[in-house]
Image: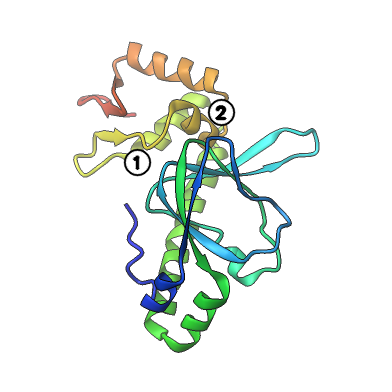
């Protein structure tokens, strides 16, 4: 889980907490940004609506992750943030955080490092979305998200969340996982997927 210990004490002291019901909106695209947020429990999806009215999921943030960082330097939020499940978020006031960065060089550097990691994660996600085959896209996801043993992948949300994250319909993801199980490439458990030894995913 990401660590937000770099946040200055003065900013933490001004933070407020908000509880969200499933489907409840935290903010909408175009709203004026007053805070950036840390997810302390549950999941919040970041999305936009395309011209056809279809929701396009950009990311699903889980406990310990922060969202709306870019909006610290913008006059509007760039997407919608909606609770995918019951969630609790901590709101850090934008003005307080920017003022702290002016005074605390180490905090500003730590925040820059956080953004750099997010850029690397985004590049991986773009790479995944550019893989046309659903099976190869899932294989790529499993290979880059395997834990320290190189085999175990812990799912932080539901399979529907994973499908949205991969840019697949949940039906396509279910079919793909079933095919990988039948071929002996993976084993599904409760909240985990194991890459089987002797097989390359």
**Marks 2 and 1, how far apart at CA:** 17 Å
User: What residue occupies the far bottom of the structure in this picture?
Assistant: 103
Secondary structure at badge 1 equals helix
The circle on residue 48 is: none
Q: Residue at x 41, y 36 (%)?
A: 141
Q: Which residue is mark 1?
A: 145
Badge 2: residue crowd in 10 Å (few <14, some 14–19, many ≥20): some
Q: Quadrant of residue 195?
A: top left
Question: As drawn, is 68 to the left or to the right of 2?
Answer: right
Dividing the image into 4 quarters, which one contains the C terminus?
top left
Which type of secondary structure does the marked residue at label 2 adopt? Answer: loop
Query: How was this image coloured?
Result: rainbow
Residue 158, percent from left and from top? 43, 29
**Image quarter for residue 200?**
top left
Tell me the residue at 48%/81% (across/down): 101
Tell me which label, 2 or 1, sits earlier in the chain.
1
Instruction: Give x and y (percent) for residue 96.
Output: 52, 77
Residue 159, image quadrant: top left
**Left or right, residue 1 beside residue 172:** left
Residue that mark 2 sits on? 168
């Amino acid at each position: 889980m990401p660590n937000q210990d770099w946040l200055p004490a003065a900013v933490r002291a001004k933070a407020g907490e908000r509880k969200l019901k499933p489907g409840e909106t935290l903010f909408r695209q175009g709203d004026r940004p007053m805070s950036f947020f840390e997810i302390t429990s549950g999941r919040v999806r970041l999305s936009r609506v395309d011209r056809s009215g279809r929701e396009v999921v950009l990311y699903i943030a889980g406990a310990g992750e922060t969202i709306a960082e870019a909006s610290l330097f913008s006059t509007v939020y760039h997407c919608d943030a909606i609770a995918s499940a019951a969630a609790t978020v901590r709101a850090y006031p934008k003005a307080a955080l920017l003022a702290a960065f002016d005074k605390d060089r180490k905090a500003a550097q730590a925040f820059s490092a956080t953004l750099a990691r997010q850029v690397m994660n985004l590049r991986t996600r773009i790479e995944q979305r550019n893989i046309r085959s659903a099976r190869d896209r899932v294989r790529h996801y499993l290979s880059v998200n395997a834990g320290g043993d190189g085999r175990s992948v812990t799912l932080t949300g539901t399979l529907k969340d994973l499908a949205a994250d991969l840019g697949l319909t949940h039906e396509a993801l279910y079919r793909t996982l079933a095919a990988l199980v039948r071929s002996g490439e993976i084993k599904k458990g409760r909240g985990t997927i194991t890459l089987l030894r002797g097989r390359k995913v």
